[in-house]
Image (cartoon, rainbow, N blue to C red):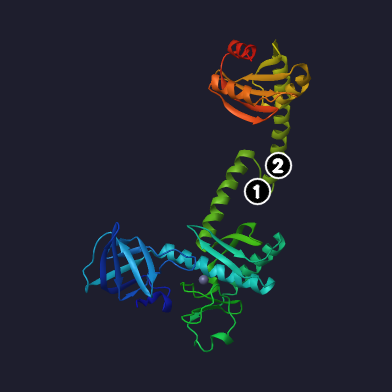
Amino acid sequence: MTIKLYENDAYIKEFDATVISCDECKNGYLVTLDQTAFFPEGGGQQADKGTINDVDVLDVQIKDEIITHKVHKPFEVGTTVSCKIDWGTRFARMQGHTGEHLVSGIINTMFGYDNLGFHMSEKTMTLDPSGLLTPDDIKEVERRANMAVYENKAVTAYYPDPEKLPTLSYRSKLDLTEGVRLVTIDGYDTCACCAPHVKSTGEIGLIKIIDYIQYKGGMRLTMVCGINAFEDYCALHDDSKKMMNLLSASRDKVLEFVVKDHDVIGSQKAEINRLNAELSKANLEIVTVSNSLCGFTKGASFDDMRALVNENIDKAELVAFFSEGDNGDYSYIVSSQTADVRDTVKALNAQFNGKGGGRPNYAQGKIVADKQSVIDFFENQ
Ligand SMILES: [Zn+2]
């Protein structure tokens, strides 16, 4: 069994250890030590980063209470090595993980929901409460969590007597009966957890739920804490400043200005679409070949073409409209009230290197062609 230094003191940044074993593995070596402060991947948290004798630790895993460190250079068994934890990364994860316990504990107290899933990525975390929360519920959870940060409550961890375990109240994802380590946030939460935590809630820093969706009958909340929340705030603030400068708007007016511009752009787009439809109608040239009506125009959208098809659908057995694009390609719609157009469209695609398809009486797509070849094609149908 590897002695887990991080369990008794989550703040160890450097330590010495003796190499117990070193075995070659795919792309490196797996090293075990008599003791380690490297947290192995587990409980939703990634493995610690850092160095052993200045050699990068690539991964840390635990199996049967033995912790292995993956490195790209071998170490001699029996030697003493000096190890360093990448403290910036570890501390941010401790802030996040304790923040997650606090938020999950508050949700459990307020609504009785369990946290069914916890995942920590580079900057953000997700947690999955087992029931639904309204936007106001989430705001209240967030407010209480940040109040608990200001209260600077103690966070402690211990292994309770297994016999006393059934009498204790705590949150847990697994039904373990031995080796249960309990992490308690004074007055807020007790949860079974193997990970290192900050020693008081004040160290979590800002807690912000930045997103939420309904997920598997409950919710998935995305959250940032501490240094990651600070960096998220800085990035948002920079973006906000840029928008304020672009729009010459003060902080309290910037949203109003964006909404106004958005509405203006929306009505301008609608006007452009209307003019474009008129233009494609003005450019329209209709050719009747055998039992088909072919229409040719330029720059029309599929919506414009659909309108043209609908206006002309009863004028021939088969109605085909083509709109020339910028690169000698044509968008097309082929439609009929009485015939199945799919064979015609298949042949059209085959002859003109086209793509597209649809239903028996309606198809749309693109071909590369010139107008006369298309007319010739419909003459031969
Ligand atoms: Zn935990």
Q: Is 227 placed above or below 319 here?
A: below
Task: Confirm if mark 1 falls within 8 A of ligand 1.
Answer: no
- Mark 2 lies on residue: 259
Question: Residue 286, how many percent across, how many down?
Answer: 71, 12
The quarter of the picture where the N terminus appears is: bottom left
Which one is in front, 79 or 359?
Answer: 359
Which one is in front, 31 or 121?
Answer: 31
- Tally the numbered discs: 2
- Disc 1 crowd rating (10 Å Cα; few below 14, some 14-19, many 20+) is few
Q: Relative to 268, is 122 on the left or the right?
A: left
- Mark 1 lies on residue: 251
What residue is shown at x 72% (from left), y 15% (from top)?
A: 282
- Disc 2 crowd rating (10 Å Cα; few below 14, some 14-19, many 20+) is few
Which one is in front, 141 or 232?
Answer: 141
Q: Amino acid at mark 2?
A: Val
| Residue furthest to the bottom | 163
Question: Residue 273, how many percent across, how many down?
Answer: 71, 26
Q: Amino acid at mark 1?
A: Arg
Q: Is 291 placed above or below 128 here?
A: above
Q: Quadrant location of residue 310?
A: top right
Instruction: Find out whether the residues at labels 2 and 1 contact each other: C-beta distance under 8 Å.
Output: no
Question: Residue 23, how many percent across, how many down?
Answer: 26, 66
The quarter of the picture where the C terminus appears is: top right
Q: Relative to 80, is 214 on the left or the right?
A: right
Q: Secondary structure at mark 2?
A: helix
Between disc 2 and disc 1, the foreground one is: 2
Earlier in the chain: of badge 2 and badge 1, it is 1
